[in-house]
Amino acid sequence: MDKIKIIYSEEPVLDNPILVEGLPGVGNVGKLAAEHLLDQIEAVKFADIYSVHFPPQVIVDDEGVVKLVNNELYYSKADGNHPDLIIMVGDYQGLTPEGQYEISDAVLGIARKFNVSLIFTLGGYGIGKMVETPRVLGAATSKELVEEMKEKGVIFSKGEPGSGIVGASGLLLGLGKIAGQRAVCLMGETSGYFVDPKGAEAVLRILANILNVQIDFSELETKAEQIDLITSKLKEAEAPAEPRREDLGYIG
Amino acid sequence: MDKIKIIYSEEPVLDNPILVEGLPGVGNVGKLAAEHLLDQIEAVKFADIYSVHFPPQVIVDDEGVVKLVNNELYYSKADGNHPDLIIMVGDYQGLTPEGQYEISDAVLGIARKFNVSLIFTLGGYGIGKMVETPRVLGAATSKELVEEMKEKGVIFSKGEPGSGIVGASGLLLGLGKIAGQRAVCLMGETSGYFVDPKGAEAVLRILANILNVQIDFSELETKAEQIDLITSKLKEAEAPAEPRREDLGYIG
Amino acid sequence: MDKIKIIYSEEPVLDNPILVEGLPGVGNVGKLAAEHLLDQIEAVKFADIYSVHFPPQVIVDDEGVVKLVNNELYYSKADGNHPDLIIMVGDYQGLTPEGQYEISDAVLGIARKFNVSLIFTLGGYGIGKMVETPRVLGAATSKELVEEMKEKGVIFSKGEPGSGIVGASGLLLGLGKIAGQRAVCLMGETSGYFVDPKGAEAVLRILANILNVQIDFSELETKAEQIDLITSKLKEAEAPAEPRREDLGYIG
Amino acid sequence: MDKIKIIYSEEPVLDNPILVEGLPGVGNVGKLAAEHLLDQIEAVKFADIYSVHFPPQVIVDDEGVVKLVNNELYYSKADGNHPDLIIMVGDYQGLTPEGQYEISDAVLGIARKFNVSLIFTLGGYGIGKMVETPRVLGAATSKELVEEMKEKGVIFSKGEPGSGIVGASGLLLGLGKIAGQRAVCLMGETSGYFVDPKGAEAVLRILANILNVQIDFSELETKAEQIDLITSKLKEAEAPAEPRREDLGYIG
């Protein structure tokens, strides 16, 4: 059995597309941002990535039909405003370090196959306390990209993130750099205690501007208000409550 | 050394058999149901599946002779009522995610080799509290199968199981769907705290009806009464007792 | 890099030798017994087994020279009394289930290479309480071997060991049976709390009789008395003391 | 994807160089010593070792550019005093035993490629209490090397280190010995509770003398004074304080 199996339902012809990755991680910032982007543009799924490095698990949909856990690739053709896009979302990241490496290496292979010109990985930057106005920090595979991103409002702050970037959002840059691929990581500040739509919105505002995509943020804002409501109630209770967490097993 | 070794003691000629899988899992519902089915029909063992993904362990039988832990395949020829059957039981599931994938992939290969027309995986659906009359929930590889199963009394309930299906009972569907194989998972409700013959009986009643097999349930019912006796005593004691568990390491 | 590397310093010509294995495990019974046997007969090391499945560790000898952790094979030519023997001892067992399988498979390959006619694996059978006169329980790859061993004083007791045999002592039988190799496991009863020279002596007395080897047990008896002294002091102290353990990470 | 990828930026011509390895470990003694050596001589990076056995992580430099975590090799040409040198430093050791073996095996392959004549591995020897004047203990692949090192002030003490040497510093000797490569491990005594510049200095003083390298130790001494200050304050506080630890996950 192959460790990683990529099944194409379609092989789109794309013009130097930009790849956007958002998987579960700190505050689920990257996953929320990429999925919201996917909701807001016309996109078609064209590939499924299955792997023995994901949990041995199926999801059951509302009709009772199963789906093996995976990562999925969608494309969105240029619409006059934004360029050709590939968006990668998924249920899980690889469970082991080796699995993480192998999956990211496979994704970079896909990126080369479709002549991807630039990769954006989206993630959260956990700072351990509530954030009113989350900054969007960046990291990139070259100085030139760092300069380009600074002009777009991305913050590059010496010593942040001090612990580096763990998981797919880091590896796509690290392995990409070695292979000569251009990539940027955008990290939205987040407490890391909650699923954080506010951090996702901050990341997506920067990205939407770069990609020239029109995004309606009202849904993310509603979710953010709900989270704010919950956290303010927790504060009132003043108990040193263990915050609710959802699927925060990954960093990056 | 091969990761998985399948040793055939016989290669039966079967006519589009139905494969039934029941391995250790939540409440051991699947294992109990599949083993009770095996007790109640004429069946012959024809294959052993050994794997480095199982524990490095032998079982010692009553005469002192060892058996390497494994999964076993039995066949039962059509008897005028039920169709040709393959029944898979075993001591363990794969210990790692990768092992789970590789073993399920090998089982699907066996299924293709014998032209299996439909796979039933049996498991428990843990709900964390005692169940008087367990429902049998289902999941399947296609809408058509979902509809067929609804007619047989299987319940498909939106959002259940919310966490998906983990282990062989899930993977045989997930990997099977990708390979174009038809499969259904039947999950008997169970507290998950005990080995649960009642959940197993519920699953097996549905399955026996589908397969047109005559089953004497008295043995499972006796076991269920014993468990009921133990749990009612525990309740009387009113202590927040840690319930006894046996071999509940797997889910699904 | 090979997962397992066998380096022969000599390739002895042996006449259907008997292989005796004793590695770390419950009460270190098997290791103690095999090493004491090795001390008591003339034997020559002829092979080292190295593996990525052992810890990434070297031992430093009294002169400051390192040795990579390994398993070692010695041979002892027939001396008129005992037959040709191969004795396997070592610092560790494989760290993972897969590693355990691969190493045992390699050892069985060596056994075939030298036409080994019978394998004895030595281990402890932990019963969780102090034992005055440890029994020696057995398990074997065939009924015939069980009968032969009963005549030698080995006890085959229905339901013991209930949990099977874990590790190399089990796998050499389990994998050996599949490959048509004859093997017996001898398990000395032990509390499992201490390194147990008494359990090792019991096992070795049975084995020495079978192999027709003369053994001086005084050293093991002295060690056993030292352990008895320690345990009786612990009892006097009447504190629920955590017993001293040495290298008891393996079962079997 | 290769498990280990070695990328050469240059292939220097070296004359029987000596390889010095210092990676994270007990007290970070080896890493500190090797990095200080690197600071004090003229050295050029010529190879990066990447591996799926390292964490799936990138480091972000002060300019915002990522670097995949790795081990790095530098060379320093003979300067009339010291011979040709290769110095190996890095962020991490392999995460698993198998990873440790595979990376050390790859490093030994590099050593053979460049005709390395002698390997020094640097590490800490944790003794669990503060050390005023750390000794430098040794281990080697042969008695001859042990004798040579004794003359250089390295201490070989029977029974130390009792638990052997774990990790790259041990494996390069253990695997090296099997492959016929000459190697010495130098271990600086350290409490193991702190990053220990004093232990590193002790190791490096011995090594600098052997290699005939001039080293300015003032920076290490300043770091050692800072650590002394912290520990003396901790003592004053007399609380059984949990000491600060930095990256001490490895032994060796």
Image (tube, coloured by chain):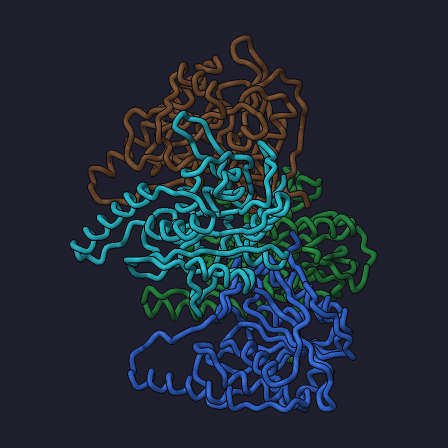
Chain colours: A brown, B green, C blue, D cyan
Q: Quadrant of residue B8?
A: bottom right
Q: Is residue D88 left or right of residue D137?
A: right
Q: Residue at x 48, y 56 (%)?
A: D185
B161 or D166, nearer to the observer: D166
Q: Is residue B210 left or right of residue B243?
A: right
Residue B29 in picture, x, y percent from top left: 55, 59
**Can the viewer see residue A121?**
yes
Q: Residue at x 20, y 53 (%)?
A: D232
**Can the viewer see residue B132?**
no
A179 or D235, nearer to the observer: D235
As drawn, the residue found furthest toward the top would be: A80
Compared with B230, A62 (above or below) is above
Residue D219 in picture, x, y percent from top left: 32, 41
As drawn, the residue found furthest toward the front would be: D80
Query: Tag count in the figure?
Result: 0
Residue B119 in picture, x, y percent from top left: 68, 50
Residue D170 in picture, x, y percent from top left: 51, 57
Q: Is residue A171 left or right of residue C169?
A: left
Q: Is residue D93 left or right of residue A163?
A: right
C64 or A164, nearer to the observer: C64
Compared with D108, A133 (above or below) is above
Q: Quadrant of residue A207?
A: top left
Q: Residue at x 31, y 42 (%)?
A: D218
Quarter the C terminus of chain C occupies: bottom right
